[in-house]
Image: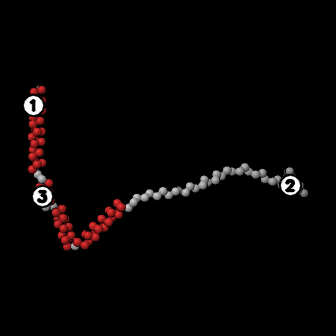
């Protein structure tokens, strides 16, 4: 069992070394220019290529709108980076506390000068 696991580890290590050597060779063989050429060849038959072709044609035929758009975008970027960011601290007015209403005790009503002690029914005649 250990003999078989040792053999498998050796084969895995050989495969790793072979893969690393192949990747190094590819890294040295392919330049960034070749990668760009391959990507352009791949994208030539896609809608992206058609869009870029139309964009280049429009830029060549009508450069003024594109220049104005570019100037507007550049102006916006420059203005947003050059504007100083000032944070103004505005004091918040503090309202006076509202008066608390407390009920006053009921005042004694003045007593009239005369009082009726009892009501006497009228006599029937």
15 shown above or below 37: above
Residue on which disc 3 sits: 37
Q: Nearer the viewer, mark 1 or mark 2?
A: 1
Q: Position of residue 80 (x, y in %)?
A: 35, 61
The mark that comes first in sequence, 2 or 3, is: 3
- Report the side of 122 relative to 44 (left or right): right
- For the residue carrying disc 3, how many other residues have a C-alpha within 10 Å: few (<14), some (14-19), or many (20+)? few
- Disc number at residue 7? 1
| Res 14 → quadrant | top left
Image height of 71 relative to 100, above or below: below
In three-dimensional space, the C-alpha distance between marks 1 and 2, rounded to whole angstroms, equals 127 Å
Q: CA distance from mark 3 to mark 1?
A: 43 Å
Quadrant the N terminus occupies: top left
Question: Residue tagged by mark 2?
Answer: 113
Q: Label 2 vs label 3: CA separation?
A: 119 Å
Q: Is residue 115 left or right of residue 59?
A: right
Residue at the image point whose x is 26% and y is 70% from the top: 67
């Amino acid at each position: 069992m250990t003999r078989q696991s040792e053999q498998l580890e050796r084969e895995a290590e050989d495969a790793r070394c072979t893969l690393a050597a192949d990747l190094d060779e590819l890294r040295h063989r392919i330049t960034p220019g070749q990668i760009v050429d391959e990507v352009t060849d791949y994208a030539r038959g896609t809608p992206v290529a058609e869009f870029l072709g139309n964009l280049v044609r429009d830029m060549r035929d009508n450069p003024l709108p594109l220049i104005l758009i570019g100037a507007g975008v550049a102006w916006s970027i420059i203005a947003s980076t050059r504007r100083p960011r000032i944070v103004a601290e505005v004091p918040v007015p503090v309202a006076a506390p509202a008066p608390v209403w407390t009920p006053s005790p009921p005042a004694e009503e003045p007593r009239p000068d005369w009082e009726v002690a009892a009501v006497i029914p009228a006599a029937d005649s």
